[in-house]
Image: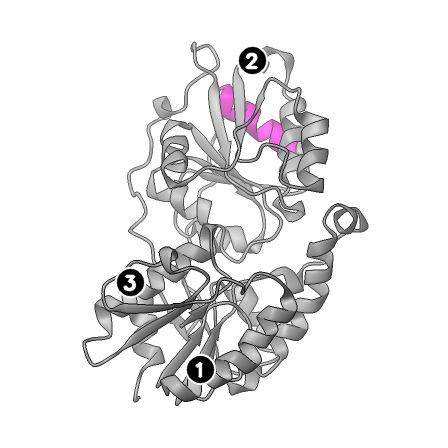
Amino acid sequence: MSAVNFSEGGPLTILRDSLAAAAATLGEQWRITALVHDHALVDLPNVETLAFPRSKSSWFHRIALEWWTFARLSRRLKPDMWLSLHDMTPRVTARRQAVYCHNPSPFYAPSMTEAWYDPGFFAFNKLYLWLYRAFIGRNYAVIVQQDWLRRELRRYHRNVVVAHPSMPAAATVRPSPTTLRRPDRTAPLRLLYPALPRVFKNIETVCGAMARLPEPLHGRVELRLTMDGSEGRWARALYRRYGADPALRFIGRQDRTGMAAEYADCDMVLFPSRLETWGLPITEAKMLGKPLLVADLPYAHETVGEYADVSFVDARDPAAWAAAISAVANGDWIPQGERGTDPAAPFYADWPSLWAYLIRDL
């Protein structure tokens, strides 16, 4: 399994979950080798690691790894199955190979403002579709997390499989109305948006919504953001514009322990992002039974699945977010709910079933 570009966040979770499932389900007849950025990222029994610490130094180095270094390595390892977890199809010799395409940026049209604040994302957006397509025909299967991404990639490969990230069963107990603190309580209603400050995360829309809250709610609602304004050009612009607002708390990036505490302490999770393959915080909020306000976009509906305590809000309308937050704070919120349906076949609901498919008949 190659995943040399994963070192944090949702992608790292995917790497660890996929390897844990492989180690638990493939059996002793399989030798599992993970190609990673750092040995310390993976500590699992029955999984060997090979580290490539320079893998993120440049795109030229990354491409050289995928198309030349891994080719030589595959001739030495002689793999039966090679799974690339990060979008690019390596030029390897294997009985079977597959690629996991998790990055939706090629199918997003950034604005000129977004290009100015994050030129790296703009260039990445233009380059990545070409990287997706290069050597894609070598794969037995192309794996994606959602049906909307399958529709895009079916233009380039016939066998595109939807596989949902493996997660513990989401909470099924609906929070009682008293779970949401009212603004007449001593503690403010605490909202949480866990996101890195990237232009498509739509942080400015919920910040603008907080500025639009009616005067009686001032001091009664708090939005916590996992950024501090030092992360880059876009983060600095957001902090300059909204950093003085007492309703906003810029708490910085959190480790796993810190995020667990933030989830536990919040009253509701917001997720307004305009672009996601999955949107892991939505699933994490469900697991804890937290109420949700999320973007009214296809990825969000699919990620939410079946859940009662959720409403969908126009991703680009701060007034709509302000109205929704006000309804929550005033005790007037009536969640829309989402019934959820599974994607059409081929679809696998977890890593064990996906692994069974990938190694079938080998």
Residue 302 percent coordinates (x, y): 48, 56
Q: Nearer the viewer, residue 287 or 306?
A: 287
Judge whether residue 328 is colored magenta.
yes
Mark 3 lies on residue: 20
The type of residue carrying mark 2 is: Gly
Mark 2 lies on residue: 219
Rate crowding at label 3 as few (under 14), some (14 to 19) or many (20 or more) other CA atoms within 10 Å: some
The type of residue carrying mark 3 is: Ala
247, above or below 92, in the image: above
Q: Nearer the viewer, residue 126 or 350?
A: 126
Judge whether residue 201 is colored magenta.
no
Mark 1 lies on residue: 73
Residue 22 percent coordinates (x, y): 29, 69
The type of residue carrying mark 1 is: Leu
Question: SS for tag 2?
Answer: loop
Rate crowding at label 2 as few (under 14), some (14 to 19) or many (20 or more) other CA atoms within 10 Å: few
Marks 1, 2: nearer the viewer? 1
Whether residue 80 is visible, yes or no, is: yes
Question: SS for tag 3?
Answer: helix
What is the span of residues highlighted in magenta in the rendered image? 319-333
Q: At x 33% / y 28%, what residue is drawn?
A: 176
Marker disc for residue 279: none
Q: At x 66% / y 71%, what residue is drawn?
A: 129
Query: Main SS type for the magenta part?
Result: helix
Marks 3, 1: nearer the viewer? 1
